[in-house]
Image: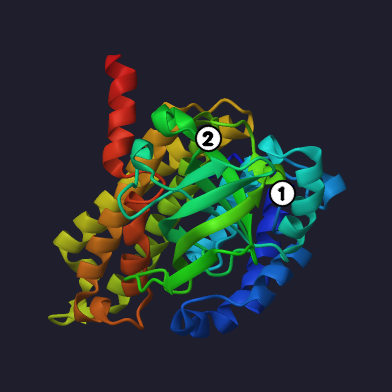
Amino acid sequence: MKRKIFAPEHEEFRATVRSFLAKEVLPHYEQWEKDGIVSRDAWRAAGKQGLLGFAVPEEYGGGGTPDFRYSAVLAEEFTRAGAPGLALGLHNDIIGPYLTGLATEEQKRRWLPGFCDGSLITAIAMTEPGAGSDLQGIRTHAEDRGDHWLLNGSKTFISSGILADLVIVVAKTTPEGGAHGLSLLVVERGMDGFERGRNLDKIGQKAQDTAELFFHDVRVPKENLLGDLNGAFAHLMTNLAQERLSIAVSGIAAAEHVLELTTEYVKEREAFGRPLARLQHIRFEIAEMATECAVTRTFLDRCIEDHARGELDAVHASMAKWWATELQKRVADRCLQLHGGYGYMAEYPVARAFTDGRIQTIYGGTTEIMKEIIGRAVLG
């Protein structure tokens, strides 16, 4: 089915993204995978190309457009290229809204120009060794010391944690407040007591640095409180719909792409003297996956349209995230099986799609959390 959600300017942007990938990303990606981190030069190149800060007002160096369809194009093309390590979606779609929506005028002028030109890489630190989806379990805490906050604690599984120049940290600022006693504090590179631990060794997305972060008596200026004091829970809930939609968009794009690769493979690969595509079982497998992808794509495009108009709610974002990422996982597994032994070889794109995509049902809220959100909404 022909997609109808993009205008000519979005397709022009798609061509720009593909050119950027061909020039600035793909020639270096294998080395980034070995290094476990991407080059800062790639971030600066992305800034020069206008791939950062779509929704940031022009006065701060951004694109001045909140149209999420540009983010969708970026996510689709990076996914099809098999290059999730340069985490532009995390920067633009997940962290960007906190800075544009919550920052004071002084904070915007201090942070947003670098955010848009690629000289200031961002991360958000929520997850702790003992607290993932459960915000009430957060132990990282900050004491009010008059002109600053004294921050102590640790975080783990933080995407872009090694490269990040600016980290939005979720910390407890009112001990008795539970999930409603949390605030967002911005920790900047170079602050005394802010240390980075290991660049964690993952099974996939190896070019994406993922780190442990430690805070030992970090003096965070009062000017670095982002949003309302003790308002982190509400702020986090406000921005989760876009985060989950962004993950869902890459999920369906990944499923479609690995299916395309596998369709071509079974046409060419022979077994028992004829192409695999001639076997009924193979045709049925491809037919099932193609149908599931088509149905999911229709729903995701509707969600993208709704979000571009500011109408996507948390429940449908959760549906999109759950369904698209579980489909991605299922399609990657079935496509690897259809590749046989070759699918287990790291040099084949299907193998990387299998390992890179496995995290999708976990971060941004697990599938189980998505179902809980949907179930509560339906049942009351």
- The x, y position of residue 146, in whole percent, is 66, 40
Identity of the residue furthest to the left in this view? 272
- The x, y position of residue 205, in whole percent, is 42, 69
Question: Callout 2, which amino acid?
Answer: Ala
Q: Nearer the viewer, residue 59 or 261?
A: 59
If you read the primary sequence from the N terminus, does the residue marked by circle 2 or circle 1 appear first?
Answer: 1
Q: Nearer the viewer, residue 3 or 156?
A: 156
* Disc 2 secondary structure class: helix
- Mark 2 burial class by Cα count in 10 Å: few <14, some 14-19, many 20+: many
- The x, y position of residue 106, in whole percent, is 81, 43
Name the image quarter holding the C terminus. top left
In the image, what residue occupies the spot 63% across and 62% down? Answer: 191
Estimate the spatial distance between the alpha carbons at disc 2 and disc 1, rounded to whole Å.
Answer: 24 Å
Residue 44 quadrant: bottom right
- The x, y position of residue 338, in whole percent, is 22, 69
* Disc 1 secondary structure class: loop
Disc on res. 232: 2
In the image, what residue occupies the spot 56% across and 49% down? Answer: 150
Q: Nearer the viewer, residue 221 or 362?
A: 221
Disc on res. 54: 1
Reply above or below: 225 against 162: above
- Does residue 1 appear in the picture of this structure? no
**In the image: residue 298, left or right of residue 167:** left
